[in-house]
């Protein structure tokens, strides 16, 4: 609004709010590079010491995502966004839709998306050592948690 920026990449709901104020949406970052919405990190030692805790946390996140994807809960979620950001309700609803579009149903990213992320890291950080998606992100705990919810 200060006219000091030509362009910016903003997350929801800020992107939607600036769009309402007359800015044009030039692109969606998710269309050009994979973006992780939520990353859960734990040390190998912690997971070995208490393996059920990690699975419990992942199951809770997956159950939360199921709740968030259910259209009957969207009004509550929009109200939550409104409470935090104090923005117009239509902007909050659009921001929620933007966020929900990038979440996967099982909590994983496709292997190709992770490989694309690796390529971006390698180029930006000048990393010469090759590594695989499995070396970057260990989804084995997530897969076990997802399977335990769907039994």
Image (cartoon, grey):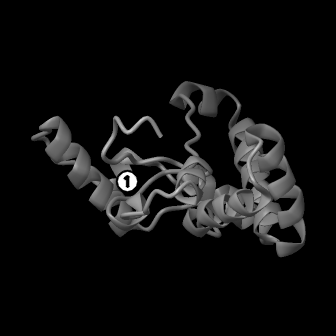
Q: Is residue 15 left or right of residue 51?
A: left
Between 72 and 12, which is closer to the camera in this rendering?
Answer: 12
Q: Position of residue 78 (x, y in %)?
A: 81, 57
Q: Position of residue 73 (x, y in %)?
A: 88, 65
Between 82 and 80, which is closer to the camera in this rendering?
Answer: 82
Q: In this view, does 65 lie to the left or right of 4?
A: right
Q: Looking at the rendering, which quadrant does residue 64 occupy?
A: bottom right
Residue 1 against residue 59 in the figure, above or below: above
Tag count in the figure? 1
Q: Which residue is drawn at 80% across and 48% down?
A: 82
Q: Residue at x 48, y 62 (%)?
A: 109
Q: Which residue is drawn at 39% across and 58% down?
A: 29
Which residue is under mark 1?
134
Q: Position of residue 60 (x, y in %)?
A: 79, 49
Q: Looking at the rendering, which quadrant does residue 40 occupy?
A: top right
Q: How crowded is mark 1: few (under 14 residues within 10 Å), some or many (20 or more)?
A: few
Q: Quadrant of the C terminus?
A: bottom right
Q: Where is residue 51 in the image (x, y as percent from the top left)?
A: 68, 38
Q: Residue at x 55, y 64 (%)?
A: 102
Residue 113 against residue 53 in the figure, above or below: below
Circle 1 SS class: helix
């Amino acid at each position: 609004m200060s006219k000091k920026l030509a362009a910016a990449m903003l997350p929801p709901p800020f992107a939607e709010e600036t769009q309402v104020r007359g800015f044009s949406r030039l692109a969606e970052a998710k269309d050009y590079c994979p973006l992780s919405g939520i990353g859960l990190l734990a040390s190998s030692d912690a997971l070995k010491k208490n393996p059920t805790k990690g699975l419990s946390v992942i199951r809770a996140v997956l159950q939360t995502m199921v709740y968030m994807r259910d259209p009957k809960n969207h009004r509550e979620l929009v109200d939550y966004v409104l409470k935090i950001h104090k923005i117009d309700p239509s902007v909050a609803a659009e921001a929620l839709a933007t966020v929900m579009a990038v979440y996967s149903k099982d909590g994983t990213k496709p292997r190709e998306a992770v490989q694309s992320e690796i390529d971006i890291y390698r180029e930006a950080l000048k990393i010469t050592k090759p590594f695989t998606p499995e070396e970057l992100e260990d989804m084995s705990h997530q897969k076990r948690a997802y399977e335990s919810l769907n039994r």
